[in-house]
Image (cartoon, grey):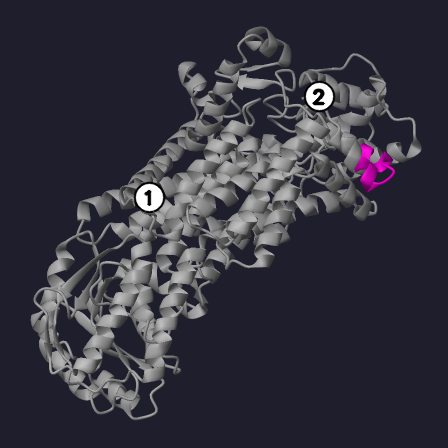
Amino acid sequence: MNRPFLSIVVPAYNEERRIGSCLDRLRQALPGLVPSWEIVVADDGSRDRTPEIVAAEAAGDARIRLLALPHHGKGEAVRRGLVEARGEWRYIADADLATPPDNLTRFLTHTSDAETALVIGSREATGSSRLDEPWIRHWIGRFFNWFVRLLVVPGISDTQCGFKLFSARSVELICPYLTIYGFAFDVEMLALARRAGLSIREVGVTWDGNQESRVAFGGGAAAFLDVFRIRWRLWRGAYSAQPRPADHDSDRIGPFSARTWAYLLALTCAGALAYDLLRMPVQVFDALEEMLAAQRSASIVDTFWSAAYNAAYLRPLRIVQIEVIFDAAQGHYWLAFRGAHALTMVACLLLFTRALRVRTVADLCAAAFALTVVVGLHTFRSTVQEAFPINHFLEIAVMALVMVNLTQARPRLIVDAIALVTFIVASLTLESGLLVWVVAVTAWLLGMRGVSTRGVVAMTVLLAGYFVLRFGVLSVGTPGLIERSSGYFFDVLDPSELERRFGDRLVVFYAYNVVSSALSVLASEPQNGVFVTTGAWLNDRLTAGLVLSFLSSLVTTGLIAVAAVIVLRRYRVSDASDRLILLFAVVLAANATLSYAYTKDDIMSVSGIFYGLAVYAAIRLLVVRVGPTQRLVAATLTTVILATGMAWSVRSLGIHHVARTYAFKTRNDWASQPGNWKRSGRWPDDVRSQQLITTLRNDALSMPAPNPHFAPLWMARLWGD
Amino acid sequence: MLLAAMIPPALLAASRVVFLVLAVWDVHPFWRSEPLNLAEAAALRDRGEVARLLAEGQDPNATYRVRRGMVRDYQVQMTPMAAAVAARRDEIVQILLDGGAKPQPPDVEGTP
C-alpha cells in the first residue's frame, strides 16, 4: 500500500457528539489540500458510541482507520496514533476542530523546506486569532506557557494548541521517549524535539475558544508537576536511554516483529559459526602451555597473583578464566573450551543485535547488512579461529557490547553496578579491556546515560586505581619492541629486526602501528600490519578475494563517512543510532592507540564490532533520508548497497572456509606435537601432564577435518589458504 | 533500497540454514570429509589423518592405491613413505617413522 502524503491523527475520548461532523469536515477539506491522505482516529477507550461511529465510517472509506486503545489519556492516544499513522507528514487535530481544517495550508507551506521537522499551531504567533475564549482560561494558559518557557522550552509562545504537524522522521525521534499521558504531553514532545535538534516552526492559527474544554482543575494542576518532571528527566539525562520498544512499536513481518527477525538472523549466523567452532580441536600453540599451567596450579588465587606479576602485561583474569574452565571440564577439555568459545561468539552476535534496537523494517534491513559486515570483517575472522584456549579478544568485544547495551538502558543502580563489574573484569583480562571505559565515557558524553554520571565517575576512579596498581604497586611495564614480531609495510619483522630498525626511534614504529591498525578496520588494508593487497598488486599476484575485501571496506567506510557528515552538520546528534557512528570513531581511535606496541588484527576486533554498529546507523540514516522523489540518488544508493552487500556476503561466507582450514592445521599440529616435544626435550616428566597432552591429541585426531586438497581452488583464491 | 540492503544477507542466512541441515547428514559443503588411506593422507600432507590411521592400525609399510591427481596425473600404488617423500613433507616422514615405517629408500614414482 502506498504511503499517503498526510495522516490526520484525531485523539478521541467520548466524542460521540462531535466525531461524525469532525470526520465529515476533514473529508470535505482534505482533497483540495493534499494529494493523498488518511485519517487515524485514536480512540482512548471511549465508553460512549465513538468507536462504533468511527468503525462505521471506516467501513465505507478505506482512508479512515480506527485505532481502539485502552484508556490511558490523551498523550498515549496521540503517541499511538502518530506511530500507527503511515503518512510522510502526520497532523494531530483535536476532535472539536477548534482550528478549522482550512488552516492546514499554513502548516503545509513549510513541508517543502527540507529542514522542517515539526510545525506547531500557535494562538499567539503572528496571524493567529482567538474567537470567544473565556478570559480566565486565556490567562491560566498564558501563565502555564510562561512556566513552560522558563523551565523547559524557551522561545515557544504556545505549546498547548492541539494542532501540530510532524514529519515521519520526527515521530521516530520523539514518540519512543514519551512518558507523559496527561495535559503536559505536548510540552514533553517539544522538549524532546528540541533535544533531538529538530527544527520547530510556529504558525498562527484561528482558534475557536467556544468549544467545550475537557481540562479539569486536577488535570491542570498535574500538568505543572509534569513540567517539573520533564525538567528533572532532562537534567538527569533520563531521555538519553533509548527505551526498550514494546511489541506494538515494532513493525511486523509475517509471524514475527522486525526485532524478532533480527534476532533470528543473528542466531542463524551464530549457529552456523558455533557449528564450525565445535568442529575445531583445541589449539596447540599458545594454548597447551596455558592448560598445563592450569593443571599444575595449586589454586585459583595463586594463579591470580602469579599472573599479576608479569614484566609487560597485567592480565591476571585471563589465566584465572582458563583455570576455571579447565577445572570445570572434568576431562572434557575440547567440549569445555570450544563450547565456551562458541557461547561467547553467540553472546557477541546477540548483544550486537540488541544494541541496534531494531523496531522498523528499515532497521531490520540495516541490521542484516551490519551483521554481514561484522562477520565478514577480517578482524572478526581471527576472533573465531583462534583461542588460547579461550578467545579473550572476543570476550573483550562481548564486554564492550555489554557496556553499549548498559548505556542504552534505563539508569538504575544495578546498571551502574554491572557496568563497574564489567569494567573490572575486562581491564584485568587484557589491556584492550580498557576500551570498556572508553565506551562508557564516550556514550555518556554523547547523551547515552544508562550508566549514570555516578557510574561513569566510579569507573574513572577505578581506571585511576588500575594505573596505580599496574605502574605503582606491581611495577608491571608496557610491551616493548621485543615482545613479538610485527608487520611493517610489506614484511613481518621479528623482534631483533624491530630492535635494529627502531631501537632509537620508537615513535616512528608506534605511529605506524596506530595508523595501520585504524586503516585495517576502515579499509581491510593493511592486515596484521602488512599491506598485503598493495604488495600483491605490485607483484601481479592480486586475487579476487583481496580486491573484494579492499573495495567492499572502502565503499562501506565511505557510506559511514557520508552519514557522519550528515550527523555532524546537524550540530546535534538527533538519534540514538546516529550516536553509534560517533561512538565507533572514538572506539577506533582508542583501540588503535592501545595497539601501539605491535599490530595484530585480533586486538582490533572490538573496533571491528563497532564498525558494524556504525554501518547499521549509516545505512539506516541514508535509507530514511533519501526520499522517493530523489530518484537518481536513490537508484545510485540502491546499486551501491546491493553490490556492497553481495561483496560482504561473500566475505562473510569465507569464515566457514577459514574455520575449516584452521581445523585442518590445528589437527596437524597435534599429530606432530608429542614427537616434536620429545625430540626437543620439552616432553613433561609428570604423568598427569603426559595424560593431558595425550587426551587432547586423541580428541583432535578423532575429529575429522576436511583436507583442503578437495576444496575448489576458487575458495583459496577468494578467502585465502 | 531496503530490499537492496536485505537481499544479500537474506540469501546468506538461507544458505547457512541449508548448511546446518546438510550437516545432519554430514554433507555440509565446507565440512565434508573424503576418506583417505595412509598413503593418500601422506601424499596430501594430512599429518592428522596419518597419525589417526596409524593409531587405528593401518600398516605403514604396506602399498596403497593413491588416486589420480594426488601424486601423479594417474593412479599409482605406493607406500606411505614414498608418498610423503614425493610430497616433500619431512614432518610426515617423521610421523611415519615414529609409527613404525621402515627407513628404506622409497619408490617415489610408485607403480601405475
Where is residue A586 shown, x and y percent of the image? 45, 37
Sort mark 1 into few (<14), some (14-19) or many (20+) by Cα contacts within 10 Å: many
| Dot 2: chain letter | B
Secondary structure beneath dot 1 equals: helix
Task: Identify the disc placed on residue B83.
Answer: 2
Secondary structure beneath dot 2 equals: helix
Eye-nearest disc, 2 or 1: 1
Where is residue A658 shown, x and y percent of the image? 57, 35
Q: Which quadrant does the N terminus of chain A fall into?
A: bottom left
Residue located at (25% from left, 90% from top): A53
Residue A523 at least partly seen:
yes
Question: Which residue is under mark 1?
Answer: A641
Where is residue A412 shown, x and y percent of the image? 55, 59
Q: Is residue A664 left or right of residue A258?
A: right
Residue A627 in the image: above or below residue A218 = above
Q: CA distance from mark 2 to mark 1?
A: 50 Å
Residue A164 or A624: which is nearer the viewer?
A164
Q: Amino acid at mark 1?
A: Ile
Residue B46 at least partly seen:
no
Q: Is residue A287 left or right of residue A448?
A: right
Residue located at (51% from left, 28% from top): A593
Q: Amino acid at mark 2?
A: Ala
Task: Identify the disc placed on residue A438.
Answer: none
Q: Which quadrant does the C terminus of chain A fall into?
A: top right
* Marks 2,1: beta carbons within 8 A: no
Residue A530 in the image: above or below residue A141 = above
Residue A490 or A539: which is nearer the viewer?
A490
Which residues, given as a range, are shown in magenta?
A292-303
Query: Main SS type for the magenta part?
Result: helix
